[in-house]
Image (cartoon, rainbow, N blue to C red):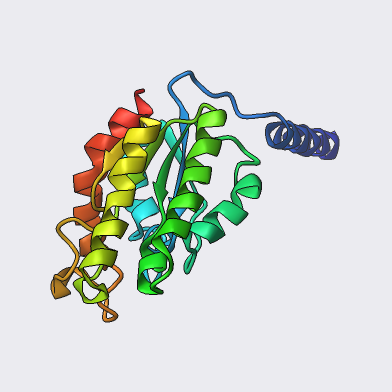
Amino acid sequence: MQIKKLRDGLLGAALSLTVAILLPVATTADERTLMLYGDSLMAGLGLSAQDSFAGQLQQALGDDVTIVNASVSGDTASDGLARLDWSLAERPDAVILELGANDMLQGRSVDTMRQSLTAILQRFGDENIPVLLAGMRASPGLGTDYVNAYEAVFPELAAEFGTRFYPFFLDGVATDPSLNQADGLHPNAQGVAVIVEGILPEVEALLNR
């Protein structure tokens, strides 16, 4: 009798576990999915998952928001466009778009970058997905003409598509050795904390749109 009760109890527990795995988790109307669509600055190159931008932003936003990090280190704007269909397989409620830094570092055509970002923003618009566009600044060593043309792309596209706009993703962090990793390009954990603190109000406004 005891063996039968034990067997029945184990069977019941196994069935309960199977149901819990197979059935979808109930969500509330307040729960939202935020996609990060960028390059290594958002992918968290050189950082732990907890210290990365995604990890620290998740902690700041809380459990009502699920972050999907669809960022890929090394991506240019054209690379981001090439993988957009695949990345949107699971439709997010909102997107932070941060691409273009590698275009600048590689000295790529500003016009090509603009065309790719335009196509990405158009796709998000077609899907009715609100976007926060994060801008970037160019190295002065690339020359005044390139810097001016490059830096104009982001505010102009934000105005064209009516997206929320954060002018400089690395605001308060760029060129500060204490907030960057040894390469001088990628923020360390402290630098990420500065970025999250600065961009958080815009992210919250995006999610409440």
In the rendered image, the quadrant that contains the C terminus is top left
Extreme front residue here? 145
Side of 207 relative to 145 (left or right): right
Where in the figure is residue 185, as x and y percent of width and height?
A: 29, 72
- Residue at 21% x, 62% y is 191
Where in the figure is residue 202, as x and y percent of width and height?
A: 26, 36
- Number of marks present in the image shown: 0
As drawn, 90 above or below 208: below
Extreme top residue here? 29
Observer-nearest of 139 and 99: 139
- Residue at 30% x, 32% y is 204
Observer-nearest of 54 and 165: 165
Report which quarter residue 190 is drawn in: bottom left
- Residue at 51% x, 44% y is 120
Q: Is residue 48 visible?
A: no
Where in the figure is residue 167, as x and y percent of width and height?
A: 23, 47
